[in-house]
Amino acid sequence: MSPAATKRIAPTPAGISEAAALLRDGSLVAFPTETVYGLGADATNGRAVAAIFTAKNRPSFNPLIVHVPDLAAAEALVVFSQTARDIAQAFWPGPLTLVLPVRPDVVSDLVTAGLPTLAIRIPAHPLAQELLRLADRPIAAPSANPSGAISPTTADHVANGLNGKIAAILDGGACEVGLESTILGFDPEPTLLRPGGLPQEALEAALRSPLRIAQPQTPTAPGQLASHYAPDASVRLNITQTDGTLLGFGPMECTLNLSPSGDLTEAATNLFAYLRQLDESTDRIDVAPIPETGLGRAINDRLRRAAAPR
Ligand code: TXA
Ligand code: MG
């Protein structure tokens, strides 16, 4: 079977309608969120969801994040505790995913991978918001990259990995946050399952208590394989001096600088695009130290995965 070419859709009202119609039809459409591009499918359509795993070549035991436009749509799918609702109201729409008990028969079992919980998110990106409203059904979307590759933060990144394997890409330019969403579970106390675009400190301030941190690779977060964010090049961390390729941070001489002024938000935005760029030109990427605070925690988490032996 030779797959049809992937269509690039412009972010016009007609384009967004076309993308929504494709999703309602059971086709796969990549779309921008403020974190990274997602590979969307109708979460109520088992065949459409199965096609995500085929396109990404992803192990099917990985559960997917479902995207909805507002809290009412979220309440129809999962059961909120008061704490979860408070957190949702404080940070949604935004770069946060909540894992909550799923209601019966609201999404395909493939989305939850048989778990009694569902990961759910309200993205803030205006194109994602409009697309979700027009699609008018929950949209399952992992990051729009082949399994094991770096998450895409531009439509070109998506096309490089998935061209010919998906129906369309809604082109919204570069993603503002550049890192995947923070994932928070409740079992029952709030637990950080994945550091991401919403800093841990912001959640702790809202909860007025320190967060429990899940150990990576526990069964509750099966997508957290150590090498999940791997470039082809080998990656070394906390390097201050090198003759090779250096991904820098803060004022320094280096090949590419995540943020010459030492701004973690800017560094997060550039992280995946710069890793891709260096990966194309070298076999070894050395990375300067990044402070383990705010978005730096999520950046270091992704870098440790990129550096993990495989
Ligand atoms: O920013 C993001 O989160 C992007 C955009 C597209 O929303 N999505 C994303 O999806 O990063 P993905 O599939 O690459 O990562 C989803 C993570 C996986 O690690 C998966 O194991 C975890 O969410 N997950 C999904 N459902 C879960 C559940 N019920 N319990 C625990 N972890 C879950
Ligand atoms: Mg991913």
Image: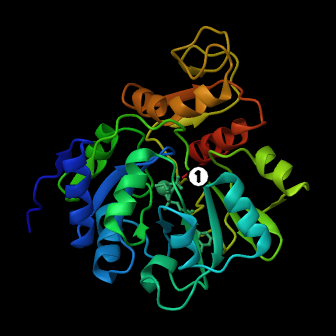
Q: Check the image and report above or below for 291 versus 84.
A: above
Q: Check the image and report above or below for 61 versus 310.
A: below
Q: Residue at x 75, y 38 (%)?
A: 294
Helix, strand or loop at mark 1: loop
Q: Nearer the viewer, residue 91 or 49?
A: 91
Find out if the beta carbon at label 1 lies less than 8 Å from the nearest ligand 1 atom: yes
Asked if residue 276 lies left or right of residue 156, the reply is right
Q: Could one spot residue 145 in this view of the protein?
A: no
Asked if residue 94 lies left or right of residue 149, the reply is right
Q: Check the image and report above or below for 75 versus 194.
A: below
Q: Residue at x 67, y 43 (%)?
A: 298
Q: Percent position (x, y) of residue 190?
A: 80, 66
Q: Which residue is mark 1?
A: 181
Mark 1 crowdedness (10 Å alpha carbons): few <14, some 14-19, many ≥20: many
Q: Percent position (x, y) of residue 118?
A: 57, 76
Q: Residue at x 48, y 32 (%)?
A: 275
Quadrant where the image shows the N terminus: bottom left
